[in-house]
Image (cartoon, rainbow, N blue to C red):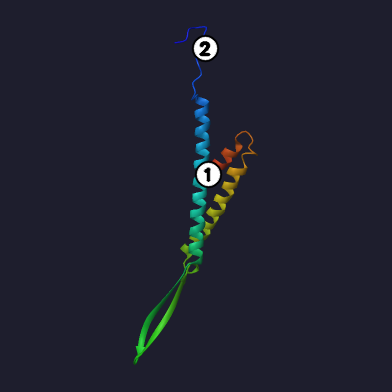
Amino acid sequence: MASKGEEKPELAGSKQGIVSVTKAKHDQIVLVLRVVAFLATASATIVMGLNQETKTLLVGTIGTTPIRATLKAKFQHTPAFVFFVVANGLASVYNLVMLGVDVFGRKLDCKGLRLVIISILDMG
């Protein structure tokens, strides 16, 4: 116990040190999550955009000769898949822009405005 005139000794793990380490770790986790989100949306867009399935069906036979029909399926044939590709493409671009803002925006931060803008854009 310190008496009235004495100061308390400073602990090695002061609150400021813990907060700064926690803040740095939080920033790294957010950055890693944004990279993972970008890679996931970009890969989904690429896979759906380039996917093409071909199926050959036996329609009938004339004598001993089989008649076959070849059908191709692409993402453009279904409006839901077109929406999926476009939405994932936009999400990929958004994640890439937010990664840039997160990495390079620290130098341009004006009184915490960057964090407010990122939070509002993430909710939209």
Q: Are marks 1 and 2 in contact (CB under 8 Å)?
A: no
- On the question of residue 74 being in view, the answer is yes
Residue underneath mark 2? 7
Residue at (48%, 65%) from the top-left corner? 79
Graded by Cα atoms within 10 Å as few (under 14), some (14 to 19) or many (20 or more), the crowding at tag 1 reads some
Label 1 sits on what residue type?
Leu
Q: Nearer the viewer, residue 14 or 74?
A: 14
Q: Position of residue 21 (x, y in %)?
A: 51, 32
- On the question of residue 82 being in view, the answer is no
| Mark 1 secondary-structure assignment | helix
Q: Nearer the viewer, residue 80 or 119?
A: 119
Give the vertical position of 20 relative to 33 (above or below): above
Examine the image and state in which quarter residue 60 appears: bottom left
Q: Position of residue 44 (x, y in %)?
A: 48, 59
Distance (Cα) linking label 1 and label 2 = 41 Å
Give the numbered dot on residue 103.
Answer: none
Residue at (64%, 35%) from the top-left corner? 110
Give the numbered dot on residue 31.
Answer: 1
